[in-house]
Image (tube, helix red, strand yellow):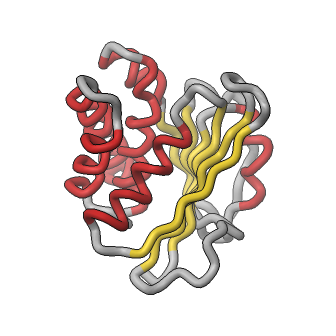
Amino acid sequence: MSRFETRLAGLGGQGIILAGVILGFSASVYAGKSATQAQSYGAEARGGACKSEVVISDEEIDYPKVEKPDLLAVMSQEAYNKYVDDIKSGGILIYDSDMVYQTKEMKNLEVYKVPATKIAEKIGRKIVANMVMIGAVSAISKVLDPDSVEKAIARNVPRGTETLNVNAFKEGYSYAANLLREK
């Protein structure tokens, strides 16, 4: 892997920024890779559009921004509509099938539907849907090993929620691993 560009997008309040921070932290601190993470969000604190972009590489990163994501993970219809056409040909699209209702036919992409919100609700807290999505991203992209991501989660989530968040990650990882086996 020379350079892998990831864009996570959704709504403010879904933990999109934290998800990006965890992926970048996992890559740079626990996996020995180079990583950059950038974020943007609307003026609204909750409910507005937001995105987090992570570039991961085995080499030094000369340009820190995502130009054409290798992987797009979206957790809202608005994010899907805004970013779905930006994915690199041959790239990966993962979307929360509980939050994205209208999709279009995509050619030259691997597309995965992950019910991240529903999985999070089954775990007991809808707020961990972002960790479910990180699990799916990790399993499908195979860019980071799950142990490094689990360590990054435990280090970056609020104290007392580590187990809940790691379990949500594991559920998302397992769900996505099953999707891969079915293909």
Q: Is residue 26 left or right of residue 112?
A: left
Q: In which quadrant is the C terminus drawn?
A: bottom left
Residue 21 percent coordinates (x, y): 46, 50
Would residue 72 be visible to someone looking at this image? yes
Residue toward you, 57 or 141: 57
Up-down relation of residue 34 to residue 100 (above or below): below
Residue 139 or 36: which is nearer the viewer? Answer: 36
Tell me which residue sits at (34%, 42%) in the image. Answer: 156
Residue 170 in picture, x, y percent from top left: 26, 39
When the figure is inspected, residue 84 is found, relative to residue 34, above or below; the finding is above
Q: Quadrant of residue 25?
A: bottom left
In the image, is 36 to the left or to the right of 66?
Answer: left
- Residue 183 at least partly seen: no
Q: Position of residue 144 (x, y in %)?
A: 33, 63
Identify the residue at horizontal 41%, vertical 45% (top origin).
134
- For the point 79% across and 45% down, the residue is 82
**How far across and down, in percent of the image, does residue 106 sit?**
70, 54
Asked where in the image residue 122 lies, by quadrant, the reply is: top left
Answer with left or right where residue 155 lies relative to residue 70. Answer: left
Q: Is residue 14 left or right of residue 131?
A: right
- Residue ID at (63%, 50%): 39
**Most foreground residue, 168 or 54:** 54
